[in-house]
Image (tube, helix red, strand yellow):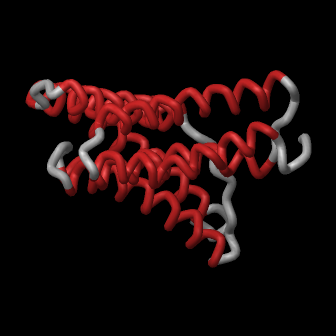
């Protein structure tokens, strides 16, 4: 692995710093700019990943920062949009609860002396992709002042289904991990 302070890591840190800006723009009703910041964050995610792979600049820090940046942006926007009644509150609660469940499980395993490595499931990658598309489309619909009815009816169910499936897979893995070596 390459040095810790690499260009891809700096790009990821900038992406994290874009989170409060995106939230503020949504709250301020500047949906065109919020969408632009969201798109810049998405492009920067692709760029930092490409740079890390192409130029062998992968770091352990980057392996942790990159998904953290994605989750911070998604959770912040889901919560903000739900508070503003632009996405269903139940969906934002589901998305946040899944991530709290995963982080809580990892921390609990560590506290119990049973640390576990996390590896993203293909379902979780699909879940993140669908969440990104849903938030991006929500921002687009709001920026263009389009009716949100169909987006909520067509977009929310796949987000919910993949969020539940992904959370269930991580819970299954956590239960198996915790049972290992305990005679179970």
Q: Residue at x 28, y 27 (%)?
A: 140
* Percent of width and height locating residue 83: 21, 57
Kindly tell me whether residue 94 is visible in this rendering. Answer: no
Of 165 and 148, the residue lying toward us = 148
Tell me: 57 left or right of 162.
right
Q: Residue at x 79, y 49 (%)?
A: 60
Q: Give the answer, above or below, for where 130 lies relative to 21.
A: above
Tell me: 102 left or right of 84.
right
Q: Residue at x 37, y 38 (%)?
A: 34
Q: Quadrant of residue 59?
A: top right
* Percent of width and height locating residue 126: 45, 29
Of 63 and 74, the residue lying toward us = 74
Kindly tell me whether residue 52 is visible in this rendering. Answer: yes
Count every numbered label the image shows and give the total: 0
* Percent of width and height locating residue 97: 35, 58
Q: Give the answer, above or below, for where 140 lies relative to 120.
A: above
* Percent of width and height locating residue 1: 90, 41
- The image quadrant where one finds the C terminus is bottom right
Q: Residue at x 58, y 63 (%)?
A: 106
Tell me: 48 left or right of 134.
right
């Amino acid at each position: 692995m390459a040095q810790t302070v690499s260009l891809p890591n700096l790009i990821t840190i900038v992406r994290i710093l874009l989170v409060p800006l995106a939230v503020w723009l949504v709250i301020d009703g500047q949906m065109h700019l919020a969408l632009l910041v969201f798109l810049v964050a998405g492009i920067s995610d692709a760029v930092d990943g490409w740079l890390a792979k192409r130029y062998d600049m992968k770091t352990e820090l980057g392996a942790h920062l990159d998904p953290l940046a994605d989750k911070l942006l998604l959770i912040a926007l889901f919560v903000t949009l739900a508070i503003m009644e632009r996405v269903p509150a139940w969906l934002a609660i589901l998305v946040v609860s899944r991530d709290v469940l995963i982080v809580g499980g990892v921390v609990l395993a560590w506290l119990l002396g049973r640390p576990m490595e996390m590896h993203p499931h293909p379902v979780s990658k699909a879940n993140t992709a669908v969440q990104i598309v849903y938030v991006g489309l929500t921002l687009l619909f709001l920026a263009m002042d389009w009716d949100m009815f169909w987006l909520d009816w067509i977009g929310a169910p796949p987000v919910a289904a993949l969020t539940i499936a992904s959370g269930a897979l991580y819970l299954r893995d956590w239960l198996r991990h915790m049972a290992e070596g305990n005679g179970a």
